[in-house]
Image: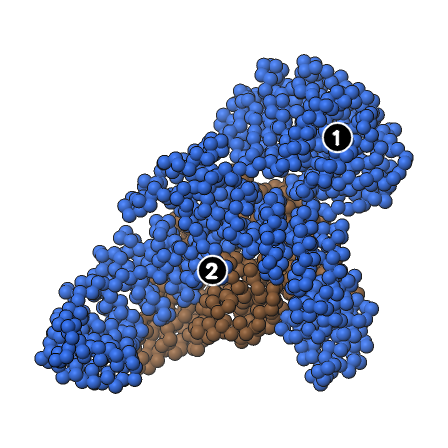
Chain colours: A blue, B brown
Amino acid sequence: MSANSAFNEEKGGSSNVGEPEYGHDPASGGIFSSDYKRHDDLKEMLDSNKDSLKLEAMKRIVAMIARGKNASDLFPAVVKNVACKNIEVKKLVYVYLVRYAEEQQDLALLSISTFQRGLKDPNQLIRASALRVLSSIRVTIIVPIMMLAIKEAASDMSPYVRKTAAHAIPKLYSLDPDQKDCLIEVIEKLLADKTTLVAGSVVMAFEEVCPERIDLIHKNYRKLCNLLIDVEEWGQVVIINMLTRYARTQFLNPNMNESLLEEGGGEKAFYGSDGDDDEEEDKDEKDKKKAEAPSVVKRKPYVMDPDHRLLLRNTKPLLQSRNAAVVMAVAQLYFHLAPKAEVGVIAKALVRLMRSHSEVQYVVLQNVATMSIKRRGMFEPYLKSFYIRSTDPTQIKVLKLEVLTNLANETNISTILREFQTYIKSMDKDFVAATIQAIGRCATNIGEVRDTCLNGLVQLLSNRDELVVAESVVVIKKLLQMQPEQHSDIIKHMAKLTDNIQVPMARASILWLIGEYCEHVPKIAPDVLRKMAKTFTNEEDIVKLQIINLAAKLYLTNSKQTKLLTQYVLNLAKYDQNYDIRDRARFIRQLIVPTDKSGALSKYAKKLFLALKPAPVLESPFKDRDHFQLGSLSHLLNAKAGGYQELPDWPEAAPDPSVRNVEVPEWTKCSSREKRKEKKVEKPFYSDSEGESGPTESADSASDTASDSESGSEESGSGSESEESDQQSESGSEEDEEEEERKKKKEKIKAKKPVPESDRPCAPFHGNGYGKDIKTFPAVCLADHAIFPLPVSTNQTITPSGNLKTYELLHRITGEGLSVEYCFSRQPFSPDPHMVAVQIQFTNSAASEAKNLHIEDAKLQSGMRMKEFPEIETLPAGETVSVVMGIDFCDSTQAANFQLCTHTRKFFVSIQPPVGELMMPIFMTENEFKKEQGQLMGMNEITEKVTLGEKCHGEHAVIQRVTTAANLSRSSCSSSPVSGSQVRWEDGDQWQPCAGQCENGDRHNVGQGHPSDPHPVMIPPTLDLLPLNPVNYFLSYGLVLSPSGQSAPVPHTVPP
Amino acid sequence: MIHSLFLVNSSGDIFLEKHWKSVVSRSVCDYFFEAQERASEPENVPPVIPTPHHYLISVLRHRIYFVAVIQSEVPPLFVIEFLHRVVDTFQDYFGVCTEAAIKDNVVVVYELLEEMLDNGFPLATESNILKELIKPPTILRTVVNTITGSTNVGEQLPTGQLSVVPWRRTGVKYTNNEAYFDVVEEIDAIIDKSGSTITAEIQGVIDACVKLTGMPDLTLSFMNPRLLDDVSFHPCVRFKRWEAERILSFIPPDGNFRLLSYHVSSQNLVAIPVYVKHNITFREGSSQGRFELTLGPKQTMGKGVEAVLVNSQLPRGVLNTNLNPSQGTYTFDPVTKLLTWDVGKINPQKLPSLKGSMSLQAGASKPDENPTINIQFKIQQSALSGLKVNRLDMYGEKYKPFKGIKYMTKAGKFQVRT
């Protein structure tokens, strides 16, 4: 109750408005209300009819939860509101439910049916949120329901719902680990998903449920690598970490041969050279090796697996991410997987992270410290970035010091030592102590500066701060052990310090030094022992042990002077409280004091005590930490954290790389085979329809007058090849006139429906108003068939669309006068039927002529291919030329990147196909269509919303809008013998179905992607169209709404 | 991944908790308090603390510790970065991220946290999407909500989450279409006793405030893109285009965002804009010390140095100071020994100076360290590295936006050792 009233105070005015009855509620009296009446007011509010009251109550309950107050007794009252209409109330109820369902399992079941209903909602966002809450309720009894829901959602057509399904997998797994096998099946299915939205979440689920099932990754490896850059940042981190582990099991160590040279130290120069050409070599290699991949394994000079290279190449740009976790993930990937020569690239990015929040710095520095031991050269250029500021927090200072020490070598030691000198003066004493240790480490590692360091440290012995002195003593002790002979004066100096220094560790160090080198200071040593014997009882344990040691050593070397003192010390030790000391005393007495019973060992006492001890090696605490995956929690803690997956060692021989070859999924294969057959069957059928569709189409186009004449000319073009080229040159002459017309039309066309197309393979250039200003090059065309692929293939039916959009490839300004535009001509690309023809038009508006226009250096996603256009020798100033090239986009909307070269310059350009361009029409019967539709996996949905204005009555106008939005057009085939047959678009090798149907044989293809929008925006399917019966449209992929039973045939021709 | 989150204020109270999986008892924070006690300064609490069953990963912002509880292996930076993103979101929503602001908006905070993580894995962290889901509270909306009983939760479904441009809301409309870019450079430097530069580097950012209708596609080009060899981008920037043409091409998020940050580290590109002459001495045996400080401009490309603020942590032995500033005001806190001198603008004709004496603890030996001097300043209308934006073009929309660009240089961690 106190929480309520406290909250009330904060919320002040808002809670009282509109709920006067609440003010009279006696239960709101705060602390005076008795326990059984707790929250009665809230319950009342929740039971009321007013949403505002419910909301207020829920807000207060959430505030209680946030404070960690128990609100579980309200469960029944809250859970009733799970079906509340008000979105915010609903959301807050969800919050409550997720928090308390575990405690009140039976009552929680009441809410399940609401979510089950939500799972069937037509809106993807509601489906997703229902699944999200359902899976968050940790109630074991609903495991089967959850399992079912996840399975269903995993094949949902909305990627967002599939993403939610991926999120739900680990939740179910933690609730009931027995479901693992079923869940792995779902994971396997989702891993095959091609959308970036799902990728990160499913890999996360994979990591939590079955990280050992590395075999599930094989088929998806290349896809994951390629998608990586577009995945959201958190997903990137998870995927990169997983791929690092994967790569360690599948590829060979790129530094295999270098490990031998490692000690030689000359590896940098040696390998520096071959790293650079690696990249270029690799591309050819990749193609080459795809064919002969299995033979790679035994090849002697190491050749990197192209998939290994793919991973390195695709992760590199992510070093520029704004997210520190992504940068770190890439850095560790490079550290663990890249050839030595290439690891260097990560240093710059890591140094950049050092500017970030101190927590980020802390983690990054830890990792840099580990890396700098193995790859010192990498960070040497950034030495100064690790210099310490007085404002850094101590933990950062110490880590920076660690890195500086790791980076110290003969060349930079003098600057580092100078820097250390300023640090010693710092006010932060912990940091000073760390600096002294660092100096000691530099001195042991670099012989040349040992004396300098030692002198410096000795000077510190006169420092006023005891901590500094003590730390120096400890470090000096370690240094002296390396060459004690030359430094007896230092030992003498230190012996004097015993009077002042109180820090136990320092005292112990001094005593040990004197004992060890008592022969160098024969006069002082017994005196020190005398003093120590006096204070023995007051010393710390470590000091006492060292006093005993000192006594024993002196007894052995100088028994005449110290015999009694030793006895005395040993007697004191005998009665010490600490059993370690008592034991030590007993042991030493037996060893050194000769008695009649003394064993064989006492003969060797001197050898035992005064043996030459090896100098300690001062090591970085970060040494060998790299056996943990860098960037991981385990690495940071230097201890295995729960759930840590060991980074496996490189395999001796690479496993079969062909496992990553992706085959076209079964159904696609068979359907494409079928389809090919069909095509042949349909050929006559199609050509039959040709003649008949002619009038249809002109009647159609009559509705928009502008295109009228064009469709007329189309007609005549449907002849042979030679006619075609004639026609083109003709159209060239019409250029001016038509260009004008086109300009005028431009805006009109956008709003207008696409010009209803003919399904002739011919003359799209003329018909579609995009290529009017083409200056044709008949010579070129005729000379080389491949250059300008004229539509010879009459067996292929391509439907030119009404208005082809022209896209800009190179702007006049960036191209220095050369402007390039392209469009998808919707023509068959005869050299390769799998390729999409892209019409490219060069306009030289510069003063001088452009020469040698050609394509170079295409960077394509795996699987994509490109057929370049032949080089254009010259393009005089002011002239325009167009050529055709073919690109196989491999069914993706990934852009094809390449360089467009002139004799002087290179331009990086890319072509990205709108989805509508990746289709071609084919025929199939309704049944076939349904069959294909059933096999769709729902991976490629792009939706577009069409708003119908006032004027859009009549079905024809609707069709126009829909086809425009979909970037597709109608292919009419009213005469088709099979009634109700469907037209489907298909691209090179895979079904890319999309549909929309209106009944009575008037078929439309409604597809995807808005051409004017570079990033098509997905909008949930809207049924704006529905009221406009008699036709139902469903603007969603793969769905054909069944005719809604109207009998009236819908004419597909509309009178002008 | 992230199990729970606890918010701890500077006096060690847990004032908010949120659990994404099973509830973790707040007693787990005791380990955190232990570590906090051990640390001498608030910022010295280790970011990662192992406990027997959990690991605590914390960040400290605005004097609030955000302590995340995790149970198994997860990249620590992942959690840290996420926590900072949470703080940024709160700041974006409430203007400030203080205990009071969080407590006042506890429901919005809870709703935000609910959307940002699902089962401990980040779900929606883009501020544009979040704002579509949960409207930020404004005074007007609070009033309207109380009267009408409507809510902060967006009525529409958040379509942005489904988009391929998740950082941009759909259906953005403005009457005035504006795009402003601020090039802000911070110079980090360490100057040694003799006035020579030990390290100097520039950290630059381009912050944008873009209020444009529809789906504009912007390109930003630079006069001297070569300067930018170490950059990190907002996810909206098309990386390939940058690689190829050194042009920033992007569909901007709506509102304020950081377009890119860059780092210029090569010494010769970094000009130090101010110099400091100092003479700070303590004499053995006497209880007085001398303190002299003079500031002057240097390589500022004709622009004035403004908002100069000097502070210095004097040694513990200093009891008090008796200084005389030629301009501005100075304060000395005898408890923390922090000397602050608010200089204001530097007039090149009459250089500001601070002179006088320090009184030391009687009988104590002279402090063996000299204080470092931290300087803050601003230089308007100039980017120290010389970075210049060439032009901004917009494609994809028809209207003409109003464009603006501003340059500024600031001191980052600018230290002078004495």
For marks 2 and 1, give the one nearer the viewer. Answer: 1
Amino acid on which the number 2 mark rests in the picture:
Leu
According to the picture, the residue beneath numbered tag 1 turns out to be A924
Chain at numbered mark 1: A
The residue lying at 71 percent from left, 62 percent from top is A91
Between residue A522 and residue B339, name the one nearer to us. A522
Q: CA distance from mark 2 to mark 1?
A: 57 Å
Amino acid on which the number 1 mark rests in the picture:
Met
The residue lying at 51 percent from left, 74 percent from top is B30
**Extreme residue in the right direction:** A1048
Between residue A407 and residue A580, name the one nearer to us. A580
Q: Label for residue A633?
A: 2
Between residue A1050 and residue B86, name the one nearer to us. A1050
Indicate the quadrant where residue B123 lies: bottom right
Vertical relation: A884 (above or below) A492: above
Tell me the element at label 2.
helix
Q: Answer left or right for B167 relative to A207.
A: right
